[in-house]
Image (cartoon, rainbow, N blue to C red):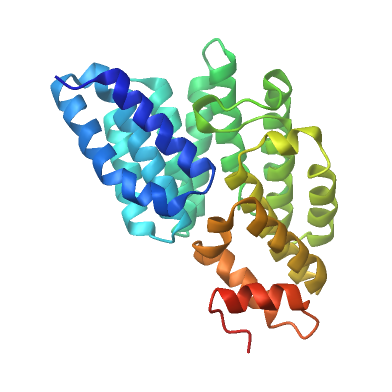
Amino acid sequence: MPDVARLARDVAHAWTSFQHARYPTLIGLLPGLLAGAQRCHAHDPEAGRVSLVEAYRVTASLLVKLGETELAWLAADRAMAVAIGNPMAVAAATVQLGQVLRAAGRTREAGTATMAAAYRIGQADLDVARISLCGTLLVHAAARHGDERVAAARVDEAADLATEVGDGNDHHRTSFGPTAVALARVMVAIELGTTDEAIAQHEKAVGRDGWRWLPPEHRAAHLIDAGHAYLQVADPVNAARVLLEADRTAPAEVRHRPAARNVLTRTVRHPDAPPTIVALAATLGLDGT
């Protein structure tokens, strides 16, 4: 008989590995974790449902990071299929579904799916865990929307929910709170092309007390986005600064994530790139010519 409690601990360990950007370690953990979660679900579908959904969620999150969009889609789709019948599990799986759809360039579908999920769970009495999921889904619905007014309204709605959650929480592995919403404003500004606003929001957000409570993966991912913004205003010095900080915070986020390596390559190709960032690129075998 599968050990449900042990499986839940294994899933939690996998999420901790992801949030600390221990991607090579997680790659080694996932095959056994998925096999164990599938056996548990087959033995007792109700008892094993949440752990299997979470195993697929963390798998999808990792695969998006590594640029493996098709495999990530498969994991997110299976998470959604297993979650059916548990509204909170469906909402949690929709977070990863939205990530995958955006990674595949299907931004309209991503917005529709995450917005629908947010309002579906928002119709019930909201506890802190449900608020965190609802707010996270609203943030994802705002990302890459293209309409400044609509995107801002969704982030504002998420910000209202975030005040009820506070910083330092991680319900459903969302890290949702006021600081997470502040970082989302930066991403929305970047995507809308208001780069000066994005940089101003970034510099304000990383000064918040809640910044240090976010997982290393979340902080490093944001710093890489900030590097992209600095490059858009031809500021390779600050782009290098935040990339080096990202590398100190979560090295695998810079060294194993294709999107991060792309920003790093663009930074070192700038004629005013600092020697420190050129040295990091050389260590990773990236061509700065």
> What residue appears at the point 62 percent right and 31 percent down from the top-left corner?
176
**Residue 171 percent across, percent down from the top left:** 54, 24
Foreground: 78 or 106? Answer: 78
Residue 59 lies left or right of residue 269; in this view the side is left
**Residue 218 percent across, percent down from the top left:** 61, 45
> What residue appears at the point 23 percent right and 20 percent down from the top-left corner?
3
> What residue appears at the point 32 percent right and 50 percent down from the top-left corner?
28
> What residue appears at the point 39 percent right and 47 percent down from the top-left corner?
26
**Residue 234 percent across, percent down from the top left:** 80, 74
**Residue 112 percent across, percent down from the top left:** 49, 41
User: Can residue 232 be spotted in the picture?
Assistant: yes
The answer to which image quadrant residue 209 occupies is: top right
Residue 96 drawn above or below residue 261 = above
Residue 61 lies left or right of residue 191; in this view the side is left
Residue 19 drawn above or below residue 48 = below
The answer to which image quadrant residue 265 occupies is: bottom right
